[in-house]
């Protein structure tokens, strides 16, 4: 619901601004040698209570945030290449009610960077532009898990990860230079990672490929929203 509200407010705000600023016909979209900067933001949060016949027995909280700034250069009218950064964090917490309460907490922080190639393949009128984007990135992730009163279950893990993914997106140009961006991330994804557990002194490696086709059935649960500005 938060994402739906953000999307609606953003669209109406910039549509109003463009209506006030535009006094003559303008061209929307990109041309060869154009440069753009972009910032996509994704966030979500939830809070749920577990119950049984005796009443409430626990509470779950989850919050996540990620920010992906990008800079791109158009080598043709339809194809752009560029660099990007990935920043994110999340926190999940489960409280088991009792005397005393038992709290399980997981914190994850990540950062990284990579390269991308974006191809614009369809125009829906003058202002809507759709694209596919192939990207590769390297990231470092730190995960901390703790449980109150039971330190033996604590975990401090560091993950180094390589990703290659395919995204789909659509942009709405509110002015000739500024567009609102909606993107479905990792519709197809390959991941290879190495995980090191500092407390237990263990190491593991994993490689996997998956498709996030669920994005199309739960549109407002999965995408990122942002702004694109043509320099």
Image (cartoon, rainbow, N blue to C red):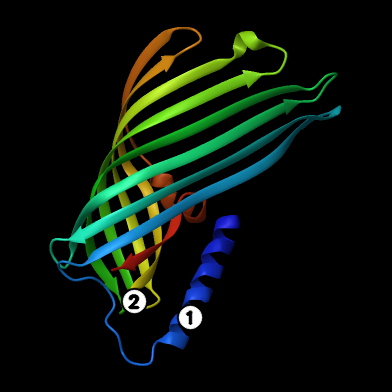
Q: Which mark is residue 17?
A: 1
Q: Secondary structure at mark 2?
A: loop
Question: Residue 107: where, in percent of width, then height?
Answer: 56, 30
Q: Are marks 1 and 2 in contact (CB under 8 Å)?
A: no
In the picture, the quarter occupied by the C terminus is bottom left
Could you tell me how far apart the alpha carbons at marks 1 and 2 are, in whole angstroms?
A: 15 Å
The structure residue drawn at horizontal position 52% and vertical position 45%, both measured from the top left corner, is 65
Q: Which mark is residue 127?
A: 2
Q: Residues within 10 Å of mark 2 (few under 14, many from 20)?
A: some
Q: Find residue 119 and report its image quarter.
A: bottom left
Question: Residue 207: where, in percent of width, then height?
Answer: 30, 24
Question: Relative to residue 25, is residue 218 depicted above or below?
Answer: above
Question: Residue 224: where, in percent of width, then height?
Answer: 44, 53
Q: Is 201 in front, or is 187?
A: 201
Left or right side of 44 for 36: left
Disc 1 versus disc 2: nearer the observer: 1
The structure residue drawn at horizontal position 28% and vertical position 55%, both measured from the top left corner, is 71
Left or right side of 128 for 47: right
């Amino acid at each position: 619901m938060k994402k739906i509200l953000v999307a609606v407010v953003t669209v109406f705000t910039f549509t109003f601004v463009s209506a006030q600023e535009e006094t003559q016909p303008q061209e929307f979209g990109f041309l060869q040698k154009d440069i753009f900067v972009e910032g996509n933001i994704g966030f979500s949060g939830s809070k749920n209570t577990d119950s049984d016949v005796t009443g409430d027995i626990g509470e779950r909280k989850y919050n996540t945030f990620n920010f992906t700034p990008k800079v791109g250069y158009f080598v043709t009218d339809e194809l752009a290449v560029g660099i990007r950064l990935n920043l994110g964090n999340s926190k999940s917490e489960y409280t088991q009610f009792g005397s005393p309460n038992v709290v399980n907490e997981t914190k994850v922080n990540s950062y990284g960077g990579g390269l991308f190639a974006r191809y614009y393949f369809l125009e829906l009128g003058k202002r809507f532009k759709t694209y596919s984007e192939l990207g590769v990135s390297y990231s470092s992730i730190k995960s901390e898990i703790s449980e109150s009163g039971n330190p033996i279950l604590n975990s401090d893990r560091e993950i180094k990860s390589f990703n290659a993914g395919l995204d789909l997106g659509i942009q709405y140009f509110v002015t000739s230079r500024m567009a609102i961006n909606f993107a479905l991330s990792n519709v197809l994804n390959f991941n290879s990672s190495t995980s090191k557990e500092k407390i237990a002194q263990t190491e593991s490696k994993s490689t996997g490929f998956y498709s996030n086709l669920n994005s199309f059935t739960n549109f407002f649960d999965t995408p990122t929203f942002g702004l694109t500005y043509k320099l």
